[in-house]
Image: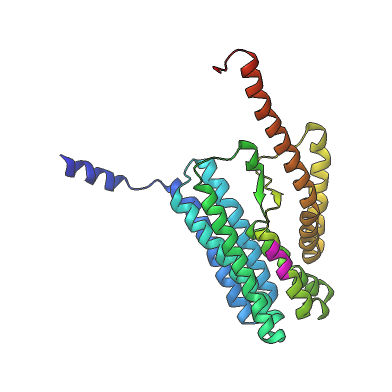
Amino acid sequence: MERDVRNRRGLRGFSVNRLIPNVLTLAALCSGLTAIRFALQGQFRLAVIAIIVAAIFDALDGRVARRLGVTSQFGAELDSLSDFLCFGVTPALVLYLASLKDGGALGWVVTLMFPICSALRLARFNTGLLSDVPPPAWTGSYFTGVPAPAGALLALIPLLVSFEAEAAWPRHPLLVGVVLLAVGGLMVSRLPTFSFKKGRIPRHLVLPGLLGAGLVMGVLASSPWIGVSLLGLVYVGLIPFSWMAYRRQASQDRHTNDVVPLRAVDGGVSQD
């Protein structure tokens, strides 16, 4: 009887819906590996495009998993491994081959620092998920530090500017190295950054928001490298606002937690 039950379970297998998020993660992983191939061939524009495609797939896999209700620990671990390669190792190698190799041994040391920062950030994120004390629900609107996909695109900005300007100076090893170290520091920092997962747009801002999105699409269509670079700079400009919003929300949360016990004591709940 037990053997028949096991056989029936084996025949049922997994639903296709459970595989879709993992397929998207593997697509991101393949895009990241393909970016390395393009960089080795000296095709840096295609390498950057492959990294951007990997970022798009990475943005989709988690959202699809939550929409379908098929999140799993396996998917989370696979996503972290993919993120480390696509947005930690790959951008660093692309920038090394495009610029930092001219910096000698110091250029390689700087290159190593970026994937190390990416690995530390992902490890901190994964261990935070296993914490015994869940954080307040409102913290889901923030990341701790710059997420790996955003960090990869920020690190590539000098290369993107060189594509648009068709000049060599944005690829100078000193400039690229400084940007790479700065972005790596933002990734492992404790700065809260907007996650844009749970944000809501007020009704009166829907139309301006759509107009702004149309403007962004127009810039990306006419000058994609400058458009992506500007988006990265806007994201960096939002970090101080995310920090202030986080502190304000944390202050309100502490105030609420302080007021509730006092009200309980005033109401005669205390047994002292």
Q: In which quarter of the image is the C terminus?
A: top right
**Foreground pick, 241 / 41:** 241
Q: Position of residue 104 (x, y in %)?
A: 68, 87
Query: What are the residue bounds of the magenta stretch?
Result: 180-185
In this rendering, the answer to whether 96 lies above or below 136 is below
In this rendering, the answer to whether 152 lies above or below 95 is above
Q: Is residue 181 magenta?
A: yes
**Foreground pick, 153 / 252:** 252
Q: Quadrant of the N terminus?
A: top left
In this rendering, the answer to whether 75 lies above or below 42 is above
Q: Tell me which residue sits at (80%, 42%) in the image.
A: 209
Q: Is residue 11 magenta?
A: no
Q: Tell me which residue sits at (63%, 13%) in the image.
A: 267
Q: Position of residue 8 (x, y in %)?
A: 25, 43
* Magenta residues, dominant SS class: helix
Q: Is residue 43 visible?
A: no
Q: In which quarter of the image is residue 46?
A: bottom right
Left or right of 59, for residue 21: left
**Foreground pick, 12 / 22:** 22
Q: Position of residue 238 (x, y in %)?
A: 79, 51
Q: Tell me which residue sits at (64%, 41%) in the image.
A: 139
Q: Tell me which residue sits at (56%, 67%) in the image.
A: 85
